[in-house]
Amino acid sequence: MPGRISAALRSLLVLAVLFYGVTRASAHPAPFSYLDIVFRDGGIEGTLVIHVIDAAHDLNITPFERLMENAVAESSRQAIAANYRLTTGYKCGMDQSDAGSVAGT
């Protein structure tokens, strides 16, 4: 009997130590931009998804909801393409002349 109590207390102590430092996990509060790359048929296909919050931040448009208005989005289209064309080309290790083909322009 004393061996059982001792083992139970040990187990309880181990669980208490394991859960003592546990905190609630939380995710990023908003969706994020990402590059989806697929290797298919000997080639590479990619889709760049830019979240409106990221694009508005990069263009200094506040509040970010303004970028969802047709007039603001249309007037910002070239700036968005230029901004991400440069970033994508740089991160892919390409020189500036190759960046346009990555951005789809």
Image (cartoon, rainbow, N blue to C red):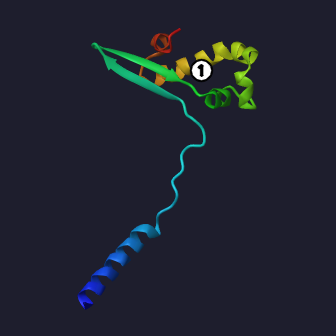
Local crowd size for mark 1, using a 10 Å CA cut-off: few (<14), some (14–19), many (≥20): some
Q: Which of the 4 image quarters holds residue 75? A: top right
Asked if residue 51 lies left or right of residue 56, the reply is left
Residue 100 percent location from the top left of the image: 50, 11
Q: Residue at x 74, y 18 (%)?
A: 72
Q: Is residue 48 left or right of residue 10?
A: right
Q: What element does badge 1 sit on?
A: helix
Q: How many marks?
A: 1
Find residue 11 and report its image quarter: bottom left
Q: Amino acid at mark 1?
A: Asn
Left or right side of 80 for 86:
left
Q: Position of residue 98 (x, y in %)?
A: 45, 12
Closer-to-camera residue (9/29): 9
Q: Position of residue 16 (x, y in %)?
A: 41, 73
The residue that appears at 71% across and 30% down in the rendered structure is 64
Closer to the camera, 15 or 64? Answer: 15
Q: Is residue 50 above or below residue 96?
A: below
State whether residue 47 is above or below residue 34. Answer: above
Write down the residue under mark 1.
83
Quadrant of the image containing the N terminus: bottom left
Q: Residue at x 75, y 31 (%)?
A: 62
Give 39 or 103, whichever is nearer the viewer.
39
Q: Residue 2 at x, y = what percent? A: 26, 91
In the current view of this chain or complex, which residue is farthest to the bottom? 2
Residue at screen point 54% across, 46% down:
27
